[in-house]
């Protein structure tokens, strides 16, 4: 009886324990199999994160770990694939959308103080009464001045969602009291065309800084404006235009090419070849065209220039372009972060890919390419340019062109070194010229505002001892010792830069560019050729490298 009693008591417990052990073994086996399955499928990253989350000795923020790991993974690919965090997207927005949400000012941090350089017309700040020269002291009751203030912190305070407000405390020049403004954030235009004007009779100049979603509309407006003045020769400045969206580059090429002419084609491992050809709807198919490029012209700029060059449609003038022939596609995540992944290469109509060589995972070496070009004298001499002569292609007229290293211009123009010396370099590197221009603007704002045109202001400024005042300013504020011989050597260049900066504070780019470009040797060469009708297709066909 005692034995049967013990059995009746212990048997259920033993069975229960066996079941529990079985469940535990099964669970462990299941987890093991699950992890094994993860590894078998190649999901090693997911498995590693699961191990860390379940078993690591300390508590870990998996999300932060993922955020810090993604850039490291992308760094092992090509130099142009990138990851943009949600925070970075919030601060900078989509710089190719043609607008951003903010208060509509351009600023410069001068002496640890945010100085408003210009106020965008019809923007929120303009409506609220903010003026150029105002200093932002407070934003939403937080001090926004002092040592350590950064552009990033300013962006965090001033940019934000459309419809939200920011309260600013403003110190206006020669006023002791702080003024307070409540500004409602709104969409602020971020134009891709910086200026349109006619440097000489019969020739229109367009400065294009990037290719964004608004570029086509802006470009057609600029062309219409120039054509209304009976302009039939166009100089489009792509220098330092690092590219942007592919479609606007195709749209611009379409304006100049004949129906059916190939503009560009793209192709990648997972993306079959796609051709983009002119529609024959262009408004400038019979007009003279010159494109200005340099080592800062990349991507979409090179698509545009490559199509024009391959079809002998216009002249390319300047220095060899950057050499970016990779196409990125944005892959957004739910938290608003974005992966910009290279998915294809683009090829000009002749079949050349102008992507310069790179080694995966070695973006540091890739980023040194422009410095290496400078050091070997490529910016000063065409003979110093290293081309891949094994990669030869031909334009429609049979001219030789080369791939794998950017676009070589039809007409090479070296960098302009007139007036550049060690004293000039110290001034520019120390921001002395820009800061002096701001201070001069503040001290003479009332008088300068009386000028009705930038030309009148320029005539006035050219009568002032601006360079000597700059030299004194730099010696007092920047501890840059005056050197009379070097000052005399760079005087004309400094005068042009100072006056252009001051004029921009009142007339924007419409006044700035006509002044700063007055002695630009690349533009001068373009204007000479345009005046001689050397950029029409029949003449372009005669050029070769």
Image (cartoon, rainbow, N blue to C red):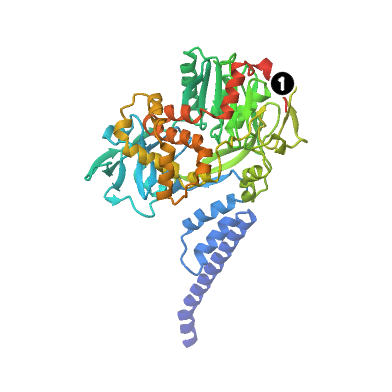
Q: Quadrant of the C terminus?
A: top right
Q: Nearer the viewer, residue 152 or 160?
A: 152
Which structural element holds mark 1? Answer: loop
Where is residue 63? Give x, y as percent.
Answer: 47, 56
Farthest right residue in view: 390
- Label 1, on which residue? 396
Where is residue 182? Give x, y as percent.
Answer: 25, 40
Q: Is residue 294 left or right of residue 214?
A: right
Residue 273, by quadrant, is: top right
Farthest left residue in view: 177
At x 60%, y 25%, the residue is: 525
Tell me if residue 430 comes above or below residue 507 in the rendering: below
Where is residue 411? Give x, y as percent.
Answer: 66, 27
At x 54%, y 63%, the residue is: 51
Does the image show residue 216?
yes
At x 60%, y 34%, the residue is: 294
Give the tally of numbered discs. 1
Q: Nearer the viewer, residue 365 or 97?
A: 365
Q: Is residue 196 left or right of residue 281?
A: left
Residue 296, by quadrant, is: top right
Q: Nearer the viewer, residue 397 or 343?
A: 397
Q: Is residue 267 left or right of residue 284?
A: right
Q: Nearer the viewer, residue 269 or 135?
A: 135
């Amino acid at each position: 009886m005692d034995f049967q009693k013990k059995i009746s008591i212990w048997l259920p417990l033993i069975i229960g324990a066996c079941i529990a052990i079985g469940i535990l073994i099964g669970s462990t086996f299941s987890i093991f199999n699950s992890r094994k399955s993860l590894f078998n499928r190649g999901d090693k990253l997911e498995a590693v994160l699961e191990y860390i989350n379940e078993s690591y000795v300390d508590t870990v923020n998996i999300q932060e770990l993922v955020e810090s790991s993604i850039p490291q993974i992308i760094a092992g690919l090509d130099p142009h694939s990138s990851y943009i965090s949600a925070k970075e997207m919030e601060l900078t927005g989509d710089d190719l959308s043609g607008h951003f949400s903010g208060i509509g000012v351009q600023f410069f941090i001068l002496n640890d103080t945010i100085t408003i350089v210009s106020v965008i017309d019809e923007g929120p700040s303009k409506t609220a009464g903010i003026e150029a020269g105002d200093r932002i002291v407070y934003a939403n009751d937080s001090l926004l001045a002092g040592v350590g203030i950064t552009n990033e912190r300013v962006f965090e305070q001033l940019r934000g969602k459309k419809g939200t407000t920011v309260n600013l405390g403003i110190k206006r020049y020669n006023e002791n009291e702080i003024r307070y403004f409540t500004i409602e954030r709104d969409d602020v235009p971020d134009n891709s065309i910086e200026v349109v004007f006619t440097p000489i009779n019969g020739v229109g100049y367009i400065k294009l800084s990037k290719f964004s979603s608004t570029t086509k509309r802006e470009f057609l407006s600029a062309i219409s404006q120039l054509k209304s003045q009976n302009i039939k020769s166009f100089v489009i400045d792509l220098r330092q235009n690092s590219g942007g969206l592919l479609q606007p580059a195709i749209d611009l090429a379409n304006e100049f090419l004949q129906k059916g002419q190939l503009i560009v084609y793209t192709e990648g491992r997972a993306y079959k070849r796609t051709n983009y050809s002119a529609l024959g709807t262009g408004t400038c198919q019979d007009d003279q065209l010159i494109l200005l490029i340099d080592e800062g012209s990349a991507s979409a700029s090179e698509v545009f220039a490559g199509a024009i060059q391959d079809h002998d449609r216009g002249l390319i003038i300047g220095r060899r372009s950057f050499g970016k022939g990779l196409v990125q596609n944005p892959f957004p995540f739910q938290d608003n972060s974005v992966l910009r992944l290279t998915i294809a290469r683009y090829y000009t109509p002749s079949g050349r890919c102008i992507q310069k060589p790179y080694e995966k995972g070695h973006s540091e070496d890739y980023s040194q390419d422009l410095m290496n070009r400078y050091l070997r004298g490529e910016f000063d001499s065409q003979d110093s340019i290293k081309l891949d002569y094994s990669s030869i292609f031909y334009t429609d007229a049979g001219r030789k062109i080369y791939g794998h290293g950017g676009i070589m211009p039809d007409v090479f123009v070296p960098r302009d070194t007139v007036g550049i010396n060690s004293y000039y370099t110290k001034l520019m590197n120390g921001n002395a010229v820009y800061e002096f221009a701001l201070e001069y603007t503040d001290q003479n704002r009332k008088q300068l505002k009386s000028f009705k045109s930038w030309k009148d202001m320029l005539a006035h400024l050219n009568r002032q001892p601006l360079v000597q005042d700059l030299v004194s300013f730099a010696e007092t504020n920047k501890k840059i010792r005056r050197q009379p011989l070097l000052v005399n050597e760079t005087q004309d260049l400094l005068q042009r830069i100072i006056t252009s900066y001051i004029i921009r504070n009142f007339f924007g780019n419409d006044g700035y560019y006509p002044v700063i470009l007055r002695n630009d040797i690349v533009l001068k060469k373009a204007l000479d050729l345009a005046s001689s009708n050397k950029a029409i297709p029949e003449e372009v066909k005669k050029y070769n490298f």
